[in-house]
Image (cartoon, rainbow, N blue to C red):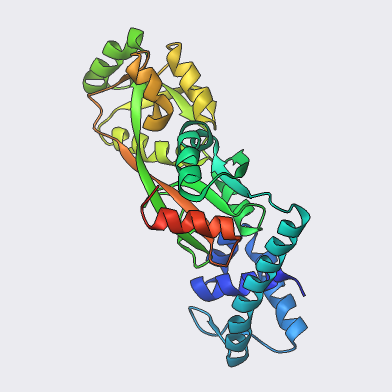
Amino acid sequence: MEITWLEDLIELDATRNFSVAAAARHITQPAFSRRIKALENWIGTQLIDRSTYPVKLTPAGEIVLENARSLSQDMYRLRDECRDLFSPGADTLSISALHSIALSIYPSYARKLADAVGPFTTRMNATDYYDCIESLSLGRSELAICYSHILGPQYLNSGQFETLTLMQDPLVLVASPQIADRMGHALGTLTEGETLPLVSYSPGCFLGKMQEILTTHYHTKRIGFHTVFENSMSEAVKKMILVGQGIGWLPNSVIRDELRQESLVVLTESTAVLELDVVLVRKSVSGSSLMQKIWDAAEAGTL
């Protein structure tokens, strides 16, 4: 029996849907179904009533679920205690964060954390949105710091995670000064068939999905874009916009210095701005004492 099977059951109870639960667990639905079946085989009885929609747990499934939550918490607590014994006196917190957040938001936030809970070491995994969630789900990270939006991926709304909103970070359309006036004017005067050069995010990343919402908004106003550069990292997008290759959307936190130095300009004709939530995320199980102190401080609004 594997602990992941118990976590699968907890997720399925939260969503009551195999495909949604599989997506939240970052595996295919057939693989998820096989793991639930493997748990049933190990227990020796049916845990899921698949004849209803949404699916529901059988009486045996309810008993296993109640114990699964407790066992999962105990296993992670055991892991954390063993890690503390392996490195006595070392307060280390493993965090996964989006690249842009790791570079632009976390450094100043880390100072606030240290003021609130005392000194500690951060083991940072700067990665993309989906790897952040997977690292948290699999226990490779204790906390994650991600963007969230009501129109974006909804993995964080499953029963597996708890979230706290730390701040808002608007996603704004910017250009270099040498092309800002021309691009701003063009936003209101494009002729049919004309498009604007876009320094774009890769479609599969979180900011790429947010960008798609914004470009769709402009398409309804008959304003189109053509991609001149594509990358999943906001720093790469920013570099190309800085040299005048095109316009693009960037989180405000990523371009604070550039806006202050006027090396980037917000296109004021743009009304399409998304307010992204920057959220602190943890699994809905007990973690280390350091993680809990940080979570309590964030929940109390002292950070």
Residue 133 locus on image (x, y percent)? 57, 52
The one of 102 and 239 positioned closer to us in this rendering = 102
The one of 149 and 52 positioned closer to us in this rendering = 149
Residue that protrudes farthest toward the top in the picture:
178
- Residue displayed at 61% across by 58% down: 137
- Residue displayed at 44% across by 14% down: 242
Instruction: Identify the image quadrant of residue 291.
Output: bottom right
Taking 190 as reference, is 141 above or below it? below
Looking at the image, can residue 245 be seen? no
The one of 147 and 92 positioned closer to us in this rendering = 92
Give the quadrant of the N terminus: bottom right
Taking 285 as reference, is 294 above or below it? above
Instruction: Identify the image quadrant of residue 271.
Output: top left
Report the side of 118 relative to 248 (left or right). Answer: right
| Tag count | 0
Residue 67 locus on image (x, y percent)? 63, 82
Residue 21 locus on image (x, y percent)? 56, 66
Taking 143 as reference, is 207 above or below it? above
